Amino acid sequence: MSDNSPLVSVIIPLYNREQFLPQLFANLAQQIYQNFELVLVDDGSTDGTEQWINQHKLISGQPTVYLKQSNSGPYSARNRGLNIAMGKYIAFQDSDDEWPDYHLSEFVEALEKYSNVDWLFGSLRRIEHGTGKIKEASNFIMKSGTTHPFIGLQNDKRGKINVINDVKASETAILHCVPGSTQCALIRRTLFENNLFDDSYRTAYDRFFAIKAVMSGFTFAFVKNTHQIYHIHDSHISLVAGADANKLQKSAETMLKGYGELLDLAKNQNETDAIKHELARVNAWELSIALQQKQQYRQASKAMFNAWRLQPKNLLYIKSFLVCLVKYAYYSFK
């Protein structure tokens, strides 16, 4: 990185997002901190995305790179952006979401001051696109009203940030995820030197990328104020709430793949047990349920058996497995 290079690289995958580009560019223009390059990776858009970008200059003369590739998914697009990014720090954003105007300025200041922090994140607020109605004020607060367990880990207060130093960080990340998604974070470029995104995933890999980073020993820190405004709308590919059984099954299979890949990173029995707990939970309450909705009771029984095998002391799993077997027998001989 030369002395004249921007300190931050903002990487944004695009796929048929022409309608959101005015909001995206306006939001970037509102950032207090402006020493960034913009890396736009068009993942095979078929709408007017490319034409819109060609017709509009970006804010304040930031260096801008626009790349277009055949549709390969958002993680492939991010990896391509990382391969050419020049910044010391990496910020990811989605084209349909927003940052508060202080997002980059607050995080650049902190990471410049605390050189041992690799991943700094804030909270995420979910709003209804179009109306602005707040659907979730902070993802740091659970539905029960309690603080997210990862935020409750032991940490050191350093100025405005909280640096996590708890020996249970990996175990907690596995069981409860890291609430700081890639889009509400600023990440040190060195974290990506041997850690790119797995582009075989189309959704959900942010969760596992963050967990892997914790398990690999990178230092995480957080602030409690909002650093990402997530817009809820009908075209989100990652939503599964209210989805049909096929989408629920696919989501469960993605989760099983992701948690299964964590086993090789486990450094102790607590981490292994946490991974098995999640594998069992997904088999029982996501995959098996989806398969039962499709009346595929043989496969549902197998998923429930896998849950019981992973956690043999869980009586609810064996009870549910037996119920699946009864349903399988009933519908087989009906």
Image (spheres, rainbow, N blue to C red):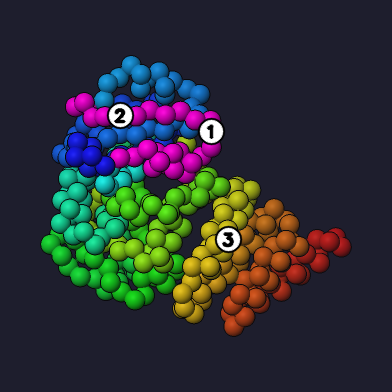
> Tag 1: residue type?
Asn
Q: Which residue is mark 2?
A: 64
Q: Which mark is residue 245?
A: none
In which quadrant is the C terminus drawn?
Answer: bottom right
Q: Which residues are magenta?
A: 59-86
Q: Is residue 313 left or right of residue 57?
A: right
Q: Is residue 43 above or below residue 50?
A: below
Residue 154 visible, this angle? yes
Give SS at disc 1: loop
- Check contact, mark 1 vs mark 2: CB within 8 A: no
Q: Which residue is mark 3?
A: 256
Give residue 245's position: percent from left, percent from top.
62, 50
In the rendered image, the residue lying farthest to the bottom is: 313
Residue 145 visible, this angle? no
How far apart are the two marked residues, 2 and 3, measured between alpha carbons?
38 Å
Q: Which residue is mark 1?
A: 71
Quarter assignment of residue 116 = bottom left
Q: Nearer the viewer, mark 1 or mark 2?
A: 2
